[in-house]
Image (tube, helix red, strand yellow):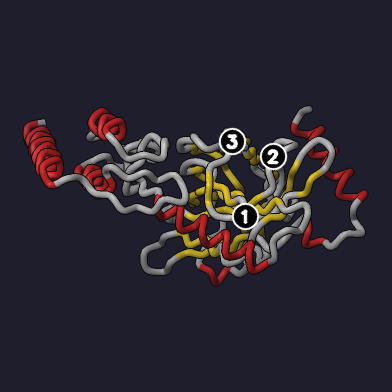
């Protein structure tokens, strides 16, 4: 089924269930985009917004919420183009606590914004699962300057996926602005109405805590901070760019700071619900600090003589 056919199919289904409360499917309040007036960093206000996934015969989906600018006073300039970056693996809560899942979530950028303007993007969909690495390049829309502007995407789980609360770790980019910190995009699939609103919100809080716990010293997303992550750091040392896997502190530069993050979390198993508790043994720590110092000195000497 093509993207246009799927959208037509979804629209037909929405018409069939129009008697249901609108809050169950389309056009919930979008995640509000704001800008810090001092740092010019994007500040997506997620609050308690989440999307409800509906189960039909062939797919589990929602087409909201999206991202938008509620009022121009939030600091976003007209003409700002927003891009989504998927930071890492799909997170999941199953009623007892965060856990892993074999499910895969697919989401597509909007075809149009709320004012009917077409959205053009070189990347139209992301597939996110428990081993996903970072993905960039999905344009979500260009702010027109109008109040209540937003754009809604399309989010889909395979039919038969387990009920629960799913969370995608995302960052928001904006032209001419500092990108946002990592935040959780939550989607709730609860066809039987098993969990109360309070339970859903508490679960989202637990997933957000896991998001923070990811580090991101687990450079290869295998839920363990170990020697393989150090190898990625060594191979990537000195590299720059927004999707370097060993860029643990998200400053677009693989350097000694990322090694420090790795050292602090070495030996940690980050698969939920285990918390970050382990650090390297003193002897190992001294060894790796020496390695960091040597490499940083080498980098400085290259900078001086090149």
* Label 2: element kind: loop
* Label 1: element kind: loop
**Residue 83 can be seen in this image:** no
Count residues near mark 2 (Cα–Cα under 10 Å), then give few for <14, some for 14-19, many for 20+: some
The residue lying at 12 percent from left, 43 percent from top is 289
Query: Which residue is outermost to the front?
Result: 96
Query: Which residue is outermost to the bottom?
Result: 73
Give the left or right position of residue 275, taking residue 124 as reference: left
Count residues near mark 1 (Cα–Cα under 10 Å), then give few for <14, some for 14-19, many for 20+: some
Q: Is residue 63 above or below residue 6?
A: below
Residue beneath disc 1: 95
Foreground pick, 204 / 65? 204
Q: Which of the two discs, 1 and 3, labels the residue nearer the N terminus?
A: 1
Q: Which of the two discs, 2 and 1, labels the residue nearer the N terminus?
A: 1
The spot of residue 73 in percent (x, y) is: 55, 72
Q: Quadrant of the C terminus?
A: top left
The spot of residue 222 in percent (x, y) is: 41, 35
The residue lying at 45 percent from left, 58 percent from top is 209
Residue beneath disc 3: 102
The spot of residue 245 in percent (x, y) is: 36, 36
The spot of residue 66 in percent (x, y) is: 65, 54
Count residues near mark 3 (Cα–Cα under 10 Å), then give few for <14, some for 14-19, many for 20+: few
Give the left or right position of residue 18, taking residue 260 as reference: right
* Label 3: element kind: loop
Residue beneath disc 2: 161
Q: Which of the two discs, 2 and 3, labels the residue nearer the N terminus?
A: 3
Give the left or right position of residue 270, taking residue 54 as reference: left
Foreground pick, 109 / 13? 13
Q: Quadrant of the N terminus?
A: top right
């Amino acid at each position: 089924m093509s993207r246009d056919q799927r959208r037509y199919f979804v629209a037909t289904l929405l018409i069939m269930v129009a008697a249901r409360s609108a809050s169950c499917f389309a056009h919930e309040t979008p995640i509000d985009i704001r800008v810090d007036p001092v740092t010019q960093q994007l500040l997506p206000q997620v609050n308690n917004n989440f999307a409800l996934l509906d189960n039909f015969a062939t797919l589990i989906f929602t087409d909201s919420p999206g991202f938008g600018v509620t009022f121009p006073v939030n600091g976003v300039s007209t003409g700002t183009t927003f891009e989504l970056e998927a930071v890492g693996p799909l997170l999941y809560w199953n009623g007892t606590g965060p856990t892993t899942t074999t499910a895969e979530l697919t989401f597509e950028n909007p075809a149009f914004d709320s004012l009917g303007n077409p959205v053009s993007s070189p990347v139209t969909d992301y597939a996110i699962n428990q081993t996903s690495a970072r993905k960039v390049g999905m344009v979500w829309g260009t702010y027109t300057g109008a109040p209540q502007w937003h754009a809604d995407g399309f989010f889909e789980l395979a039919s038969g996926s387990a009920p629960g609360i799913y969370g995608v770790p995302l960052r928001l980019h904006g032209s001419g602005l500092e990108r946002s910190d990592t935040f959780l995009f939550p989607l709730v699939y609860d066809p039987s109405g098993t969990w109360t609103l309070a339970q859903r919100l508490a679960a989202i809080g637990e997933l957000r805590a896991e998001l923070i716990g990811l580090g991101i010293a687990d450079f290869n997303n295998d839920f363990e901070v170990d020697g393989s992550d150090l190898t990625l750091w060594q191979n990537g040392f000195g590299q720059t760019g927004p999707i370097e896997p060993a860029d643990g502190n998200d400053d677009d530069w693989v350097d000694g700071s990322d090694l420090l993050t790795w050292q602090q979390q070495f030996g940690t198993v980050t698969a939920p619900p285990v918390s970050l508790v382990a650090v390297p043994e003193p002897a190992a720590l001294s060894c790796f600090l020496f390695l960091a110092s040597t490499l940083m000195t080498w980098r400085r000497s290259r900078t001086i003589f090149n």
